[in-house]
Amino acid sequence: MLNKLASLKALISPLTAFFGGTLFVSGAYGLLNSVLAIDLNEAEVPTFYSGLILSMYYVGYIFATASSYKVINKAGHIRAFSAYVSIMSALVLMHPLWFNVWYWGILRLLEGYCMASAFVCLESWLNTRANNQNRGLIMSLYMITSYLGAASGQLMLNIPDDLGFVLFVIVSILYSIALVPISLTALPSPDVSKHKQMSLISLYKTSPVGVVGCIISGIMVGGVYTLGAIYAQSCGLSLYNVSLFMFFSILGGMLAQFPIGRLSDKFDRRFVMMWTSGGVFLILPWMHIFISGSIGELIPAALLLGSGTFILYPICVSHVNDQIDDSVRLEASGMLLMLQSIGMIVGPVAISFLMQYWGSIFFLISLSVVSGFFVLFTFKHISFRQDVGYKAVTPTDPIPLAPSHVFSELAKDDTILDRAKNIFAPKTDK
């Protein structure tokens, strides 16, 4: 047990600042999405138009993934992350100044640009710290942190806000706090001097399942984040139950990360993606009955929804990064986020249209159909393509019994907090 705890510390300790910043950014991101969706719904803005406004966030994603890498290459990961999140903190406070759908749409576009740029910093940075033998594990820890923050943010919906701007202030505070651990980290930024260009066509040829999977993930994640609260309200749930639905949906995604991430390190990641998507295809249409029922039925249904929806993206990212080198990771991270953002635009707009004209149940049916398509696409490539390098053959223990070479390298770079502990720790005579 002591060896396992020591190995876990060797893995997490050098990444504490990284995960701390991710936690607060995700908490702010999750809370803001739900606050805006509820405000638009309470203002009786048609569901389709609400979907369009909220999807402008992901239009900003596309612009960011096409240009933000230039700023990151010039300023470095830490400075770029701090700049983008600082602007995001200011943009959030501009929402309560004026309720206008066009104005909010512009703000969402700018917010999407800033957040996508920040995530490009985080994900390209993280992938340079991993290798093919542990990338699924490390990405699962990153996604656990992300979803824990986003799920916790949903519970803040219950904070009284009679003035109409308190929740926006809280979101801004969370973004500001996220800057602290990243700005103070001693973890070295990736070397951007070896950056190379990579086209989307080359990326697709390298990993067609990973590329298409990111788009499918965007449709599903965008649908849940953008329309989940509206769907829950359409089912007649109270604000408290809406917050529970969103919280347990994201919590389900978080809980699935660790076991599925470990599984994807042991087997061909395409098989893992295909089987999880197949489960979503079969289960989702029946969940409407339980979500409209009691809390005892709502919670497990929300957990299943989240566990199937939020697991796809990190496996896709791991699958793609298994087959590329460090010189193109920044470019690849931007393109993968761009592909997900395309799905996040198309998904909410199409699903909100179906919900408005054919009922709220099409929220679940749409996600199920998209999952079924991805199952067929993945099966086709597994059956008829003999691609070299697709299989992650080296297993990764969730808690290694002894630090591997990569964990030893990670442990060399610790945070300022870790160094302070060493400075002030009592010295013992040898």
Image (cartoon, rainbow, N blue to C red):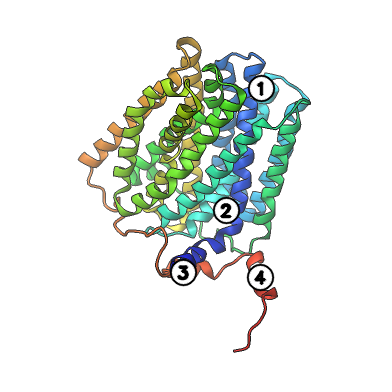
From mark 2 to mark 1, how far is it between C-alphas? 30 Å
Closer to the eye: label 4 or 3? 3
Residue under the point 59% across and 36% down: 30
Choose the circle earlier in sequence order: 4 or 3.
3
Closer to the eye: label 2 or 4? 4
Residue placed most toward the observer, 398 or 91: 398
Residue under the point 29% across and 49% down: 268
Q: Which residue is disc 1 drawn over?
A: 39
Closer to the eye: label 3 or 1? 3
Residue placed most toward the observer, 19 or 187: 19
From mark 3 to mark 2, how far is it between C-alphas? 23 Å
Q: Which residue is disc 3 drawn over?
A: 2
Closer to the eye: label 3 or 2? 3
Residue 322 rendering spot, x and y as whole percentages: 37, 53
Residue 341 rendering spot, x and y as whole percentages: 51, 34
Q: Quadrant of residue 131?
A: bottom left
- Residue 421 marker: 4
Give yes or no for contact between labels 2 and 1 (Cβ–Cβ under 8 Å).
Answer: no
